[in-house]
Structure formats: structure tokens, C-alpha cells
Amino acid sequence: MHTASDGWFETARFGLFVHFGLYSLAARHEWVRSREAMSQASYDRYLERFDPDLFDARELARAARRAGMRYAVLTAKHHDGFCLFGSSLTDYTSVRAAGRDLVAEFTEAMRAEGLRVGLYYSLLDWHHPGFPVDEHHPLRDSPGRRETADLADYRAYMRGQIRELLTGYGEIDLLFFDFTYPGMGPEQWGAKELMETVRELRPGILVNDRLGIPGDYVTPEQYQPDRPLERDGEPARWEACHTLNGSWGYDRDNHDYKDPAQLVRMLVQSVSCGGNMILNVGPTGRGSLDRRAHGILRDLGEWSAEHSRAVHGAGPSSFLPPANALYTQAGRRLYLHLLAWPPRHVHLPGLAGRVRHAQLLHDGSEIAFQQVDGARHEHNNLAPPGQPPGTLTLTLPTSRPDVLLPVVELFLDDEELST
Ligand code: GLC
């Protein structure tokens, strides 16, 4: 694993993914051109209408920050080949189409809000003549399909664009390449050379694994790991990428939304397994977040405001949580995330004698506890029946606090630092 990162990624834990492009105007998934096998001329209707008048990067940055996100990644180029930056290598850009360098606006706004900045770059490119007309290509069934792609030309194009992105927009903290599939892999991408260019320009950058060669982190997609991930027997740095409704690009008629409480549970599960979560929004054709996305970010922000320290700078714990709960830990503070609200008592194995103080995290209200001390078990009439020695039992309020995911903060004794 490349280790140049100063640990910002692990501290940040929660990121915003932004998929925006010409497909946002179609409003029916970012693969619309491929799914509907559209010709370039037909897809050009979005280019002609492209006018992101409501794309406000500062507003987006504020929404992300408030939601508890600490980094953000924008699609500099997606599979359709359309670039959200001013590239000297193509006219197929937001600068040509609308006079807007959205990568510039985005990177500046995110940094101003204190967020780390990442860029997504599609390895597929259905606009570039050098890219082969393969099974994903919109022209796959067209009679006049191109047989003779010039991949060397396309490779040079990618290297050139990556150079533009990594030299023209200040410090870029992360690169998300997408993606490798049968027939198109490291050899076709010139992955090794591309990676060398990236490392040379930005030694501290984190690069994902989708070039088909090992990168700095792995990217389970719309899949939630429930244990730490490994690669070749070594712990892997990872980030689960998730959508709000199954689509990355704006998808107007798709109402299959995850609810905010579920999203918080996914975030906490990621942190409890040593990973990150990046949550996607697909701005509308005019570039703003729709009400659903807005509402979800706002709800996440409400939880985040009161629970940030159970996530940011926190990681997995070596203690074993009880059923229906997850632990995250930051130094001497152990966070018990209660996925289901227990009837008054929750029993924590192995924590007797190790906790100084317990409180609900959202309001700092003290939580009483009793401990079954192994030696005095039978004489201690405060000890809850049926619990093995070493158990710490918390007494919770009867009614569940009105937060998306209730968390108890446990202050461990100093000695626990060494465990
Ligand atoms: C997939 C999809 C792509 C999306 C990406 C995000 O690779 O092809 O549309 O951008 O996942 O991880």
C-alpha cells in the first residue's frame, strides 16, 4: 500500500461523491447514452442545452460540510467523455459548452470549506475516437461502427488530461479512476505509466484500485462490508461508495431512496470496520441538488453535528460489541452505536472495571452502569442476573432518543490505551 497520505483519509471517514454531466439533463441514469444506444448526434441534444446555472459549488461544499463530510470527489470526466474542465486536448468540455470550468469551481469551493478534494476520471470514453467500440459502447450495434480504434492515441489523451487535472487545479488529494473490465485493463489503459505520471506530479495523492493494478485503497461499490477488508492477507484501506437511490447521475423518476437512518448505519458500519463511506449526489440538469438529496444531507448533518467524534478520527475497536450494536473507538473513547433500542439495559462483555464514565453522546447526559466484578459476583446484589463476570451493564432511558442512531460514549480507563 502506498503510504504517502498523512492519514487525512482515515480521519475524514465520510465523503461526498458528485456525478454531474450531460447525462444529468437526460435525468435517467449516467449510463443513458449506452443503455439507449444513442448516437453522438442524438446525445448532443444535451450538449446544446447544457447550462448549469444552478451549479453552486460553494453551496455544495457547505451542504457537504454540514452533512459531516470531510472530502468530496467530482466526475471530471464520465464514460460519455464530457469533461467538466477546460482541456486543451478536446472541445468536449463544460468550458466550451457553457463557459464554466466546474472542476476549478469545485476544487476551490471545497478547499475553502476545509474539505479534501478528489477527482473521478473515467477510463471509458465513448466520445474519443481512439476508444474501441466494445460491448458497453453506445455504437455497439450501429452498422457504421468503428473497427479501428487507436488505443495508443487514447492512452496519450488520458495521460495528458490527468496531467492537466493534476497541475491546473492546486493540490488534488485523491483520484478515482473508473473502471477495468474484461478486455479493457491495465495494459489497455497504460496503467503503469499513468500511475507513474500521477505519482510524479502528486506524490502524496491517494489513487483507487480501478486501473486494474493495486492502488492505495479499494472501492467496494454499492456494497457494504461488515468486516475489515484485506488484500493479499494485508489490511486494505477502503471506501464503500454508495448512491442515494441506486443511480449515480440524476435519475428523476427513481424513488428507491435509502433513508437517512440507514445511511448513518452504513457510515458507522464502515468506520467500525476501519473503512470510509463516500455518498453520492447527482445534481439536476441545472446543477443543483433536488429536494430529496437536500433533505437527506440535512438529516445526516443533524446527526453529524451531535455525533461527529464517533466518526471523524475514530476507527474500529478491539472490543466485541453486544448484539444489535457496533463499536467505534477514538483513543480512550469507545462509542456504542445502538442499532436497536434495548429494553432499559444493555450488557457489554469485557468492559467491567474499565469504564470511568458513560453518557449519551448527543446530549452528554450521564448513563448509569453496574459491573459484574468476577470475584464478587455472587455477593453483589446490584449485579444483573445471568451475565458473565466482566460484564458492564448500562441502564438506558426507557424511550429511545430521537436521533437517527443513538450512541453511548464510554470513557475508558487510561490503562485501556494500551489494549
Ligand atoms: C460504476 C459506474 C459508474 C459510476 C461508478 C461509481 O463504475 O459505471 O457510472 O460512476 O460506478 O463508482
Image (cartoon, rainbow, N blue to C red):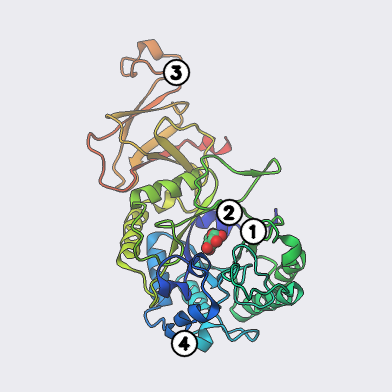
Q: Amino acid at mark 2?
A: Thr
Query: Which sits earlier in the primary sequence, circle 2 or circle 1?
Result: 1
Location of residue 344 with respect to 74 vertically, above or below: above
Distance between the alpha carbons at the discs numbered 1 and 3: 48 Å
- Rendering coords of residue 311 (x, y %): 45, 50
Q: Earlier in the sequence, mark 1 or mark 3?
A: 1
Of helix, strand and loop, which one carries label 3? loop
Residue count near mark 3 (Cα–Cα under 10 Å), binned few <14, some 14–19, many ≥20: some
Instruction: Measuring from the top left, give residue 46's x and y in whole percent.
Output: 45, 80
Quarter that holds the C terminus? top right
The residue indicated by pointer 4 is 98
The residue beneath circle 3 is 389
Amino acid at the residue labelled 1: Arg
Q: Earlier in the sequence, mark 3 or mark 2?
A: 2
User: Which mark is first along the chain, 4 or 2?
Assistant: 4
Q: Is residue 22 shown to the viewer in this render?
A: yes
Towards the viewer: 78 or 197: 78
Say above or below: 326 vs 46: above
Circles 3, 2 touching at the beta carbon (< 8 Å): no
Give the alpha-carbon distance from disc 2 to disc 4, as whole Å.
Answer: 32 Å
Report the residue marked by disc 2: 219
- The answer to whether mark 2 and mark 1 are in CB contact below 8 A is yes
Report the mark closest to the observer, 3 or 2.
Answer: 2
Query: Which amino acid type is shown beneath numbered disc 3?
Result: Pro
- Furthest residue toward left: 399
The answer to whether residue 333 of the structure is visible from this angle is: no
Alpha carbons under labels 4 and 1: distance apart: 31 Å
- Where residue 257 appears, as percent x and y from the top left, is 35, 55
Which callout, 4 or 1, points at the residue further toward the start of the chain? 4
The Cα–Cα distance between marks 2 and 1, rounded to whole angstroms, is: 8 Å
Residue at position x 62%, y 84% from top? 90
